[in-house]
Amino acid sequence: MTIIAALGCGMMAGVFFAFSAMVMPGLRRAEPAVGLAAMRAINLAVVNPAFIGVFLGTAVVGVVAAFEGDPLAWAGAALYGLGGIVLTGAFHIPRNDQLERRGTTEYWTRYLREWVPMNHLRALLSLAAAASFTLAALN
């Protein structure tokens, strides 16, 4: 379970990193109406069984791995829970919902300013979780 949790966290860190390093900078370079429309389409497309399965499944597997007793696995579960699940639910999803409702280029500027730095944090916490689970698996 610990290895599966490490792999899941690594996958999610990679997804979040790709958004930070490529997707969002690319959308920022586009005309605001184009970037906004593309992000709205991405927000709709991300709600699919493959992504949701890995995203939420990693959290479940991480908690199961933590109950195997290794303190590093507990750290991994906490880091992914905070970075992957809590930040997404409390910060990113509400802004994605606002983007869908408001859909103005003015809001797009604010969205980028708020969403992107917290996505960097989400990527770092997920990567730290992957490292914690990896070290736990090596114990």
Image (cartoon, rainbow, N blue to C red):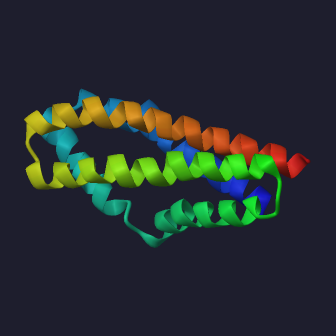
Q: Is residue 29 rendered to the left or right of residue 50?
A: left
Q: Is residue 28 rendered to the left or right of residue 68?
A: left
Instruction: Give residue 1's quadrant in the image.
Output: bottom right
Q: Is residue 115 rendered to the left or right of residue 73?
A: left
The extreme bottom residue here reads: 49
Asked whether residue 27 appears in the rendered view, the answer is no
Q: Residue at x 59, y 61 (%)?
A: 59
Name the spot of residue 108 as percent of width and height, x first: 17, 37
Asked whether residue 103 appears in the rendered view, the answer is yes
Q: Residue at x 52, y 39 (%)?
A: 123
Q: Residue at x 49, y 40 (%)?
A: 122
- Total number of numbered discs in the rendering: 0
Q: Is residue 29 above or below residue 27?
A: above
Q: Is residue 7 above or below residue 35?
A: below
Name the spot of residue 130 as percent of width and height, x first: 69, 45
Q: Residue at x 48, y 63 (%)?
A: 51
Name the spot of residue 15 as percent of width and height, x first: 51, 46
Instruction: Give residue 32's quadrant in the image.
Output: top left
